[in-house]
Amino acid sequence: MPKEVLICGFSDTSVIAKRVAKLTGSLYSAIKCSPFPDGESLVRIVNNPKGRKVVIISSMFPNSNKKIIETLLAGSAARDYGAKEVILLATYMPYLRQDKSFNSYEAVSAREVVKLLTNAYDRVITIDPHLHRVNSLREYSGKAGEISSVPAIADYIKDKVRGSYVIVGPDEESSQWSRAVARKLRKEVHVLIKNRESSYNVKVSSGNFKLHDNVILIDDIISTGHTITEALKLLKKKGAKKITCIGIHGILAGDADKRIRKYAELITTNTIQSKYSKIDVSLIIADAVRNNQHR
Ligand code: R5P
């Protein structure tokens, strides 16, 4: 890929951004965010964006409020300094849960955050957004779209998991990912039934199906970990011997990881970097950049 593409990473996305730059033969630039005494951020792209297609890779997590602002400012700096095109590659898109107003006078944060970002960028692409009531971020803006980590997850399983196994989704909302991975691997898939009474109170039940000794449980977001932990307890009761739990976006709030690891091996992608990020999405991003998939 010609050197007129500049792949930029914040401190938490620098590893992915450098890999993507290498894979696509592009230039890499760090984005520096320095704090003012009142907590505001001074945002600067280290290398010159002039005349280049600039791809800014941001996870917008943790501290999403602050990181959304820094992401907006990085896009505006690229534009002010003459970038030909400014693209946001959001490895994780926050605020998508609230894709409708569930109770009177609540804000629809998903629509508003996508609108904010697409105002600042020519294109906004995200990996596996948490969408349920809308099918694509395109419904919020023609400049937004998504790519999927499913091929990377399927390759990881193919490479690491031996013997027979069944794929399980902990709830209907996440079943689009468990079903897609199972389809790619031509494996059996079962989706559990979840009732969420509150953020911390989740009940999971199942239909009648036979388990293999090995189970791979797949969810898009692991936040408090209650969904996964309840699913794990149920699978253990049903006789699962070894469970591998794969989350796309490992938010892992509080001690979510500890609770999950009592029952299963925990693996996530690196859309949000942590010690569990064993599945690398750099190749998926590089393909999107190379093939102009963001158009
Ligand atoms: C549900 O809508 C999602 O697919 C996840 O299951 C959910 O976000 C996980 O949340 P938690 O880890 O807090 O149970």
Image (tube, rainbow, N blue to C red):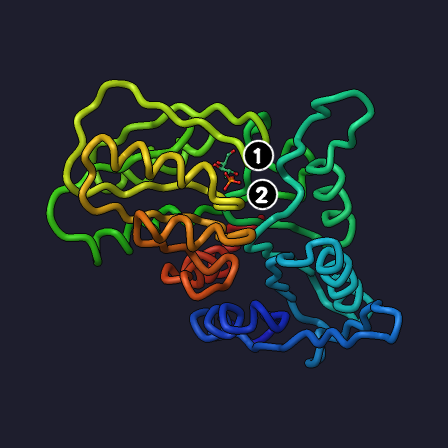
- Between residue 191 and residue 295, name the one nearer to us: 191
The outermost residue toward the left is 163
> Which image quadrant is residue 36 in?
bottom right
Decide: is 216 above or below 281: above
* Disc ID at residue 136: 1
Q: What kind of element bears circle 2?
A: strand
Which amino acid type is marked by label 2? Answer: Gly
Identify which residue is drawn at 51% across, 52% down. 252
Identify which residue is drawn at 58% across, 69% down. 12
- Between residue 71 and residue 26, name the one nearer to us: 71
User: How many other residues sit within 10 Å of disc 2, few (<14), some (14-19) or many (≥20)?
Assistant: many
**Which of disc 1 and disc 2 is earlier in sequence?**
1
Labels 2 and 1 touching (C-beta < 8 A): yes
Disc 1 residue: CB within 8 Å of ligand 1: no
Residue 183 x, y percent position in the rendering: 27, 35
Estimate the spatial distance between the alpha carbons at disc 2 and disc 1, rounded to whole Å: 7 Å
Residue designated by label 2: 145
Decide: is 290 above or below 95: below
Q: What kind of element bears circle 1?
A: loop
Residue 146 x, y percent position in the rendering: 54, 44
Identify which residue is drawn at 40% across, 61% down. 276
User: How many other residues sit within 10 Å of disc 1, few (<14), some (14-19) or many (≥20)?
Assistant: some
Residue 106 x, y percent position in the rendering: 78, 28
Identify which residue is drawn at 79% across, 68% down. 77
Residue 14 x, y percent position in the rendering: 56, 73
Whether residue 174 is visible to the viewer of this picture, yes or no, is yes
Please indicate whether residue 20 sits to the left or right of residue 244 in the image. Answer: right
* Disc ID at residue 16: none
Whether residue 152 is visible to the viewer of this picture, yes or no, is no
- Between residue 111 and residue 246, name the one nearer to us: 246
> Which image quadrant is residue 213 in?
top left
